[in-house]
Amino acid sequence: MTVTKEPEALAAPKPEDLAALLLESHRPPRPSALSVSLTFGWRAVLKIKHVPEQLFDVTAFPVMMILMFTYLFGGALAGSPGEYLQYLLPGVTVTSVVMITMYTGVSVNTDIEKGVFDRFRTLPIWRPAPMVGYILGDLLRYVLASTTIVLVGLILGFRPEGGLVGVVLGVAVLVAFSFAFSWVWTMFGLLLRSEKSVMGVSMMVLFPLTFLSNVYVNPGTMPGWLQSFVNVNPISKLVDAVRALMAGGFNGQAMLWTLGYAILFTVVFGTWTMRLYNRK
Amino acid sequence: MNAIETSGLVKIFGDTRAVDGVDLAVPAGTVYGLLGPNGAGKTTTVKMLATLLRPDDGQALVFGHDVRADPDAVRRLVSLTGQYASVDEDLTGTENLVLLGRLTGHSRAHAKERAAQLLDAFGLTEAAGKQVKHYSGGMRRRLDIAASILNTPQLLFLDEPTTGLDPRSRNQVWDIVRAVVAHGTTVLLTTQYLDEADQLASRIAVIDHGRVIAEGTKGELKASVGVGAVHLRLRDAHQRAEAQAVLSRVLDADVQLDSDPVALTARLSGRATEQAAEALAQLAREGITVDNFSLGQPSLDEVFLALTDKKEAAA
């Protein structure tokens, strides 16, 4: 004999228990901005935990980037892939992580129309917390991508003079900048109507930003008008700062520029994001 | 004090006046029904009261706090169970409740404990570790309401809580709502179903095209529409014309011929059961055999038709 179990056959709710629960409830004081942001970050991590395949992108993509460019340009630009790698690796780490920041926009865009946001918006909490939570969750991806790429680099023969400390500091600066830069994508995630348009705009912004920089070649070889853009490009400044740290030095000017850009992105796009979020 | 008080509430989307001057007074500690068809402005009204949308005009007070001037004070008192499940589909039942507990300031341990108790009270313990996207409609609703009462709100918005549920799940949701109200929480319930408002609400506002077209207790509202209708099925289709004549004489009302050749429907007014019994007796005396009859409450359609007819007649 076969018994088909009805899927809905679960325990009925118990109104008596419910009454008891309602009575004993007390509302704790309002949690701090940091605490709610971290809780939203935890939510983002839970989403990764339930669908770990989404981390494939952030690990496979950087590996592909470094292999491609090392062997494609290495011989032509620096004499050998091994030598080129010493120049390329910090820059390609920056490119990969900055490329990954666009996923923030995609997740905001796909998530925001869901009913659960109505609930979040009716909670008496610090308003930007859900957005900060996305970016906090994404920091995990940035760290993972950076680690992957540095490890692959080391295997291929990358020998940074700054040692472990220099590399860790470089990655830390990169992750901090990416946190600020992600506000651009939370803004687009809220502004644009579909996931596809978010992807499209991200590519339009990221391709020129990462390629018209000092990541792949020395800007000195470029025409003057292009140099003037490349030299103020935030990615170039970030790459200079990271490169110096990984090489065991410190480029104060590049660091200052990077910090300035990070503050600019956070203030402008953070504010814009919150305007859009409050209006949704 | 009234839980909700609005005057001249307006929300405009483009050219549409989605809410067009709504006045409400919802007494604390009761279930108040907002009844209306899709697109009537129910959800928009709820969203303004829950601080999700800013009113374009008019005033809305929730326990005396202005939703525009002091939204955070309102947010501390209300919870919303939206029309589309206000829970995170990608997370499990437990994770959803713990998340909400943490966001409202509970310690991790207390949030976990509270989540487990709520899941148990809502009959969801077995599904606690499953992602919500694998839940049935009824389970999702229960989790949604569990999330809404995690902190025992003063005012709970339930936006069409039983739309799309099977009858058993619907009854369970109703039991939950009754338990919540018995505790003292005020509930603003929007629904398209008259019987749902009838089961739960003590006062009802009927909304259409962004305006309140009728307001009152259930009794008042029904009396204004008539009591309902009696549906008859005859043994013999040839007797239908005769039956129609008898019914319109006895009931002094319109009698409609249904598309089924043996069926007819008569509107009732006043004392429904007595009238129906009288009509049946008269039909028997005239030798018309009735196979089957049922006494129906006025449907929402009928309430609407009656109310909008009245409005047009008055204009």
Image (cartoon, rainbow, N blue to C red):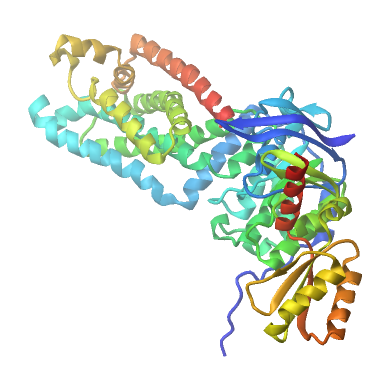
Q: Which quadrant of the figure contains the N terminus of chain B?
A: top right
Q: Position of residue A120 (x, y in %)?
A: 63, 38
* Residue pictured at 67% horizontal, 71% vertical: B258
Q: Can residue B153 be seen in this snapshot? A: no
Q: Is residue A29 left or right of residue A89?
A: right
Q: Residue at x 77, y 68 (%)?
A: B266
In the rendered image, the quadrant that contains the C terminus of chain B is top right
Inspect this view and state whether residue B27 appears. Answer: yes
Instruction: Name the foreground residue: A212 vs A219.
Output: A212
- Res B297 → quadrant: bottom right
Q: Is residue B238 left or right of residue A106?
A: right
In the image, what residue occupies the spot 78% across and 86% down? B289
Measuring from the top left, give residue A232's x and y in whole percent.
Answer: 30, 12
Pick the residue in front: A83 or B304.
B304
Taking the spot 57% from the left edge, 59% from the top edge, the residue there is B130
Tally of numbered discs: 0
Residue B150 higher or lower than B225, as above or below: above
Examine the image and state in which quarter residue B10 appears: top right
Is residue A156 toward the left or the right of residue B270 in the image?
left
Left or right position of B201 against A235: right
Measuring from the top left, give residue B256's x and y in whole percent: 71, 68
In the displayed structure, B35 sits above or below B252; it is above
Seen in the picture, residue B76 relative to B235 is either above or below; the reply is above
- Residue B188: x percent and y percent? 77, 45
Looking at this rendering, what residue extends furthest in the bottom direction? A1
